């Protein structure tokens, strides 16, 4: 399944994203999910499952089944929009609380034996320093998500998106 996390208004998502169906699922970051509170229940009490009762639980279930994961977000200072970031933070239960060394850095051990293909589609008036920050962030998130590979694409406006 291909999961697309986005911050687009519903009308724009319907025009710019591929049709939803069995192989493609969208998850709109709005209305915002509650941010991760660091309770660690997804690690200790309910392995892999967030206990915060909101739409973020659905996102976690979808991410667990995805083999391709696309993030569509307005670029904020080289990072993701606040609602996309809050949603993505809820994935912490998909890794274990233990660490391993990857490329000389400490990272969490994956909970599941699968590797997603990660793609970023960032839009907005993005400066060169923001672009460089976004590339570093995407690479770091690819390691944290244990992605098989990752790509990043930039767009001046959301209506220029070419997601598939």
Image: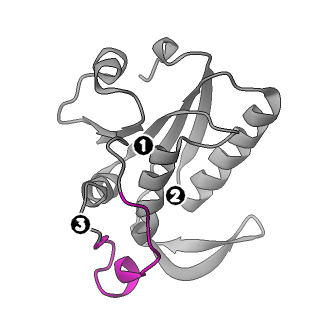
Q: Which residue is drawn at 60% across and 80% down?
A: 99
Q: Nearer the viewer, residue 14 or 96?
A: 14
Which mark is nearer the camera, 2 or 3? Answer: 3
> For numbered disc 3, what is the local secondary structure?
loop
Real-space Cα separation, disc 1 to disc 2, in angstroms:
10 Å
Q: Which of 39 and 152 is in front in this view?
A: 39
Mark 1 crowd level (few <14, some 14–19, many ≥20, 10 Å Cα):
many
Residue 17's x, y, as percent? 35, 22
| Distance (Cα) linking label 1 and label 3 | 23 Å
N-terminal label among 1 and 3: 3
Residue 120, percent across and down?
A: 54, 35
- Residue marked by disc 1: 69
Secondary structure at badge 2 equals loop
- Label 1's element? strand
> N-terminal of the two: label 1 or label 2?
1
**Which residue lies at the image location 42% right of the left edge and 53% below the top edge?**
87
Picture colour scheme: one colour
Residue under label 2:
145
Image height check: is 105 above or below 9?
below
Tell whether label 2 touches label 1 (CB within 8 Å).
yes
Q: Does 42 appear in magenta?
A: yes
Number of on-image labels: 3
- Residue 12 is left or right of residue 36, and the answer is left
- Spot occupied by residue 75 in the image (x, y as percentages of width and height): 61, 34
Q: Quadrant of residue 52?
A: bottom left
Is 57 positioned to the left or the right of 96 in the image?
A: left
State which region is magenta.
34-51
Mark carried by residue 53: 3
The stretch drawn in magenta includes residue 144: no
Residue shown at 29% from the left, 26% from the top: 10
Determine crowd level at label 3: few under 14, some 14-19, many 20+ residues with C-alpha closer than 10 A.
Answer: few
C-alpha span from label 2 to label 3: 23 Å
């Amino acid at each position: 399944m291909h999961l697309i996390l986005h911050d687009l208004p519903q009308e724009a998502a319907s025009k710019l994203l591929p049709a939803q169906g069995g192989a493609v699922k969208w998850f709109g970051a709005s209305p915002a999910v509650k941010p991760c509170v660091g309770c660690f229940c997804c690690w200790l009490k309910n392995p892999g499952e967030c206990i915060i009762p909101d739409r973020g639980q659905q996102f976690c279930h979808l991410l667990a089944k995805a083999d391709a994961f696309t993030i569509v977000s307005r670029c904020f200072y080289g990072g993701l929009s606040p609602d996309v970031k809050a949603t993505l933070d809820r994935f912490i239960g998909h890794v274990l609380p233990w660490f391993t060394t990857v490329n000389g850095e400490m990272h969490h051990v994956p909970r599941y034996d699968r590797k997603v293909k990660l793609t970023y589609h960032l839009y907005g008036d993005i400066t060169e320093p923001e672009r460089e920050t976004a590339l570093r962030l995407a690479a770091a998130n690819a390691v944290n998500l244990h992605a098989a590979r990752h790509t990043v694409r930039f767009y001046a406006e959301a209506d220029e998106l070419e997601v598939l």
